[in-house]
Amino acid sequence: MKRVLKWFFGTIGILILLVLVIGTAFLYLSPQFGGSASEAQQEAYAATGHYSEGTFINAEEINMEMNCHSITAMLRETMNPDPHVAPDHDLRVEKINPASLASLPDTSTRITWLGHSSFLIETEGKKILLDPVFGLYAAPHPMLGRARFHREMPITIPELTDIDAVIISHDHYDHLDYPSIDQLRDKVQHFFVPLGVGNHLRRWDISEERISEMDWWQEERYEGLKIVLTPSRHMSGRGLTDQSATLWGSWVIQSATSNIYFSGDGGYGKHFKEIGEKYGPFDVGLMECGQYNKLWAGVHMMPEETVVAAADVKARFIVPIHWGSFALATHSWTDPVERITKAAEQVNVPIGTPRIGESILLTGTDANTTEYWWESEMMALLQLP
């Protein structure tokens, strides 16, 4: 009996050690986790006024109380999410004809939702990708995340050509996807990222001259466009030891014919009014409204707050983002869009809700229409045998 117990516990110990070795090797050797800042870079970050002791800091304090009660509540919600946290069938997407990307006049601006926070923007003859995530999982490994709600993307990376710029809001996996960047690397002229995120790109073999790392309120001119990194109230991190080691933000993209605001991720705060006063009004606000929870309300807005934030930045109309593709919280997959459309209607704020893959022309009459396409998806779900 003693021999059996010794063999059993010895085997368990070896398995645990093996898991730890494999996990540590993956964490430190996998390119997924990106790069880190040098001492010289950290000294430069400290001069920004919102970086201290290895981490970036929000302008407004975030209270994410981590105690026995909150952790228990989080675990309980995670184990018992809404029964419709994800659809039970693949969502239908609108497929994009690659030939159509060459047909838009330079005087028009077209925005196409690719799901979650990913967009293709065409303006002034330029093609810009925002937070391009084409992978099936928003995680460093498939075992660590749920699959996206639609296995097909509206367009594939091989079908994309001549991308002028990629803009990244922050380095979380649902916004900065290594396999997508790896496939896009030779198709993209330039990358615009917050401070520190450039280290990830450098590790992924993107040359220095193609990277613009920017601080909050920093402006750059690129091919006739004005690109500005503006604040958001959030955090960052890709591994176990790099929490908030890189900056996060929202973006302003101005051309001769349009003014676009991309919120990235973040909680509600005074920065929205500051952005609106300095760069508004905007033709459209691409505004985060999903993956929220009262336990982390400081870093993700509730849909009702999103409507207020859009008014603060002086957005002419709203396109809700950060929903419809990944289950990163425990609410139902349609809760974000149901709540934001209701809140927008109550205060008469125009809102556009394209299906994934659908485009909106900023000069078109369809810009502020709402199509309740998710309702037909839910009906299809209810009718399944």
Image (tube, rainbow, N blue to C red):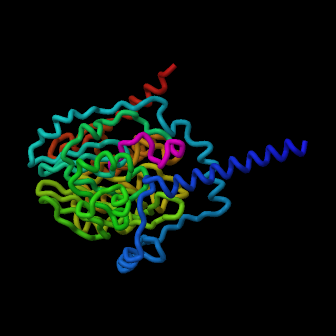
Name the dominant secondary structure of the magenta segment.
loop
Q: Nearer the viewer, residue 373 or 325?
A: 325
At 29% from the left and 43% from the top, the residue drawn is 113
Residue 188 in the image: above or below residue 235: above
At 36% from the left and 80% from the top, the residue drawn is 47
Q: Is residue 320 visible?
A: no
Q: Quadrant of residue 213?
A: bottom left
x%, y% of residue 169?
A: 34, 58
x%, y% of residue 284?
A: 24, 52
Q: Nearer the viewer, residue 157 or 380?
A: 157
At 25% from the left and 46% from the top, the residue drawn is 120
At 24% from the left and 60% from the top, the residue drawn is 210
x%, y% of residue 370?
A: 29, 39
Q: Quadrant of residue 100?
A: top left
Residue 92 on the magenta segment: no
Magenta segment range?
Answer: 132-145
Q: Is residue 266 visible?
A: yes
